[in-house]
Image (cartoon, coloured by chain):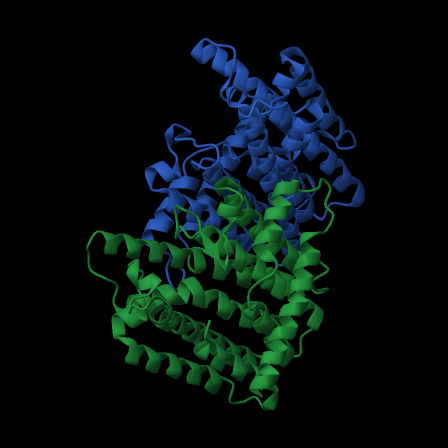
Chain colours: A green, B blue
Amino acid sequence: MSAEFEHRLVLVAEEIEATLAEILQIATDPPPPARLAEAMRYAVLGGGKRLRPFLVVEAARLAGGDPATAMRAGAAIELLHVYSLVHDDLPAMDDDGLRRGRPTVHKAYDEATAILVGDALQSLAFEVLADGATAEDPSIRADLVLTLAQAAGMAGMAGGQMLDLEAEGRYDAGEAQLDAAAIRQLQAMKTGALLAAAVRMGAIIGRADRDADRALAVYGEALGAAFQVADDILDIESSANAMGKATGKDAGRGKGTLVGALGLPAAKRERDRLADAAVAALADFGPEADILRAAARFSADRRS
Amino acid sequence: MSAEFEHRLVLVAEEIEATLAEILQIATDPPPPARLAEAMRYAVLGGGKRLRPFLVVEAARLAGGDPATAMRAGAAIELLHVYSLVHDDLPAMDDDGLRRGRPTVHKAYDEATAILVGDALQSLAFEVLADGATAEDPSIRADLVLTLAQAAGMAGMAGGQMLDLEAEGRYDAGEAQLDAAAIRQLQAMKTGALLAAAVRMGAIIGRADRDADRALAVYGEALGAAFQVADDILDIESSANAMGKATGKDAGRGKGTLVGALGLPAAKRERDRLADAAVAALADFGPEADILRAAARFSADRRS
């Protein structure tokens, strides 16, 4: 089953890559500026596990939704995710020069271009969702837009990034750190909201009944939380291995992490408990939900 | 009629202000970070003619659309417009410290907050449009999202800002300036697309028939172009009055303007011709379109 999961993860990533490439080269009138279009392709194509699209596609499959709709919706959430990476990397934000081993967009181009790439990717995500080519039923399209917009906005991803920057500021000023509850809240907004939205978008595409929708919502939230604790643990452990020291990049910047707040053993227990909760949420489904169960384990146990 | 236009412009601006205030204080779970919510209100509330919402509202009225839907859609396009102002003002973009006589968001707060304010305002614009509270009919909601997203994105507003920055770069490098055709294209994307989208959104809300939709589309494009030439002229003339010199802020930066490319008299003729074209596009409507006719004159002749 784990082999099947990995096989499907790669398969969906390939299809998403092709869908993204197609979306990014659609002819518009007027055409977009060459520099902007090129920088958007640079940011989007050729990388990533495409976990959020995978969750859209697999949740939609479980709920009996149209696979073509799911693929387009998966591409849309990836466009939105990439916009957030491009903006988070900016000098005024996390100031990162490398991502996936390549210069970040503001390094490969410039800051203004990176701001516009992020802005245009966000618009494009909603354009794709609202387009009749994504789903015939306009109520599915409107619901997809609403779900993604709520997850992306001030009470979701953007709000979480704001909390993260505020926590860093407090660290730099020598002030009190966030406690575990505040970090969980921050992470639920910054990372969890979009992962949970991916699963909910799949449920919308399949017009899941009330029980299935509820189960998938619980699953998505637990998976999102497990993913982020795993990230904190990875930050510590990969740094320890790669750089021979015990503090990771995030911890060293004053970013609140659950490892910092709880200690490594307790953080690992929380991660495993969250993965168990995600799997448990799918108890009423049969083997057809095994891929999503494996995705929850993968989100908690990933090595990169 | 001009008095009625000005009366209605103020009236709609007041209603839009109230709608925006309401949207920005809606309780979410979790709540947005206080700093982000406050900076979003700072950016959005208390200023501006609200011309884009006015066009949505008046085009919807002409097309027989629901006024409450139009007011919400008007608020959404204003949120999107304000996001673009906040990002355009950033140091890496136009580097402006003042807007409407107040410090810009990155001056009043900081750069990271300003980036997130813009990002969250864009998400919020689409959230408002997709929300069932905006229109019962999901096909209206999906069409509104699609129209606004296309106008905002790489082939619209964001693309136009990219062209503008590229033109500035060429100016700084002493390279050839844009010709009039290239400037018209740039302006159609950067400013015209959103103004035209406002009118089209009104037509969508009223489910205008094919002829009316076509007439409103021509009207919106001509109005958008007239608005921008008027802006170029205003830039020169208000600078000349206020600062006793003949070059304006935009021209002095190397931003391509039609005044620069054509000279002032020809630019004024183009502005008036475009306003005439906007009015002419509404020839098949009766006096019920007088407000929109006045809006076209206003966009061309405004003093600020």
Residue occupying image coordinates x 54% and y 19% = B234
Location of residue A103 with respect to A68 vertically, above or below: above
Location of residue B68 with respect to B280 vertically, above or below: below
Location of residue A291 with respect to B161 vertically, above or below: below
Along the line of sight, the residue nearer the viewer: B280 or B97: B97
Along the line of sight, the residue nearer the viewer: A200 or A56: A56
Residue occupying image coordinates x 68% and y 31% = B185
Tell me where residue A225 appears, x and y as whole percent. 41, 73
Tell me where residue A139 appears, x and y as whole percent. 65, 64
Along the line of sight, the residue nearer the viewer: B68 or B130: B130
A79 to the left or right of B98: right
Residue A264: quarter of image: bottom left
A151 to the left or right of B291: left
Tell me where residue A299 appears, x and y as whole percent. 47, 76
Residue occupying image coordinates x 53% and y 40% = B81
Tell me where residue B149 appears, x and y as whole percent. 62, 49
Location of residue A123 with respect to B297 vertically, above or below: below
Residue occupying image coordinates x 53% and y 83% = A294
Residue A51: quarter of image: bottom right
Does residue B15 appear in the picture of this structure? no
Q: Quadrant of the N terminus of chain B?
A: top right
Residue A134: quarter of image: bottom right
Does residue B225 appear in the picture of this structure? yes
Total number of numbered discs in the rendering: 0
